[in-house]
Amino acid sequence: MDYRGLVILVIACPCALAISTPLAMVTAITAGTKNGIIIKGGEYIEELNKVKTILFDKTGTLTEGKLEISEIKSFNNYSNKDIMDIACSLESKSNHPIAKAFNDYKKENRLKIKNVSNFESIPGKGLKAKIENKMYYVGKKDLFNYTKKLLNVDSLKDNLNKTSVIVGNDKEIMGLIGLKDKIWKNSSATIKGLKNEDISTFMITGDNKSTALEVSNNLGLKGFYHDLLPEDKVNKVEEISNKSSVAMVGDGVNDSPSLARTNVGIAMGMNGVDVAIETADIVLTKDEISNVSKFIKISKKAMNIIKQILVFAIIVKAFLVILGITGHIGLLKAILTGDMGVTLVVLANTLRIGKTKHQNKGLLIC
Ligand code: ADP
Ligand code: MG
């Protein structure tokens, strides 16, 4: 009887069950790391499996965020140079992706930066600062409403069909600058891949409606929300996460509060700002948007394998316990099958999570 008890003890020992989940998580995390995806904890792998909606920021996330100045329009007798002198001077103090376009323009056209004081960056709207004791504003339409001065910015509406920046002072609009950005070459395939996984994709952006519509149509997103301030982004995230589990992908300071509120926050790590990277649960170190769908596949595979392993181990062990009780299995066989055997099968299966197969230029998970 003591011998049978020992056989049953060996078979019933849950080491295979105990190692399966942590091992699968570590393998999934390692698979992610190999692809430039840093995961700050195993719980996000589990959470990603529940995600039904993914919200994407636009600039720097779905688009490259490498903006270029493509158009300058001047008003009220100001010259293009007047406008760009002011805009470049204010933007030299900003670290928004838009500012980079102005810095490039400044270098190319050898503009001299003017002394700027009382500089203020208004998230999701733009910048304000004093030059030679006069207040200037560089940003979107709302920035001018924000000043509570009645500027006739509505007359510019027709011009606002791409990412655009208005330059003005307290009294009048000086000009309008159009910027173009490129959509990441993998954004469209990523959105399609997520659709195949039954995940709805939306864009949340601070940019205007027509730019948002163009990007959304181009990528086949389920929908978009435009002209959102950082707090509007948070409200949107909370509203959607009340209905289902939500992940968000973003790169900017403006995205950080919403990244913190989502079930899984994902930051674009290469060009993303530090605060977004720190707040996020997952960081894409290569700014490779397709890694979002890639890692969802990895995490789904990990969770499926964990379930398969648990069912397999429980069934095999239950069967062997019956053999042990009825005296049909000896100690050595019990060790080789119920203990070592099951553990090795579990090990071999968890390693499948990290297996990838090469297809064209990208890596696809088997
Ligand atoms: P997104 O959500 O697309 O990343 P943001 O919320 O950062 O965009 O910005 C929203 C809008 O605010 C921009 O499209 C731009 O019109 C204006 N804006 C923000 N920062 C700046 C800046 N530094 N200079 C000019 N305009 C800005
Ligand atoms: Mg952004």
Image (tube, rainbow, N blue to C red):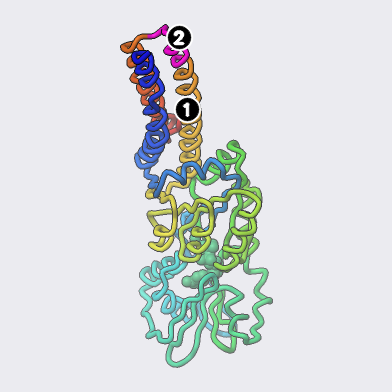
Q: Which residue is mark 1?
A: 310
User: Helix, strand, or loop for circle 1?
Assistant: helix
Q: Is residue 150 above or below residue 140?
A: below
Q: Which residue is mark 2?
A: 326
Location of the N terminus (image quadrant):
top left
Taking the spot 44% from the left edge, 29% from the top edge, the residue there is: 359
Q: Which residues are magenta?
A: 320-329
Report whether residue 178 is seen: no
Q: Amino acid at mark 2?
A: Thr
Report if residue 324 lies within the magenta region: yes
User: Helix, strand, or loop for circle 2?
Assistant: loop
- Marks 2 and 1: which is nearer the front? 2
Taking the spot 38% from the left edge, 47% from the top edge, the residue there is: 38
Of residues 95 and 69, the one nearer the viewer is 95
Q: Residues within 10 Å of mark 1 (few under 14, many from 20)?
A: some
Q: Is residue 175 above or below residue 43?
A: below
- Report the magenta stretch's main SS: helix
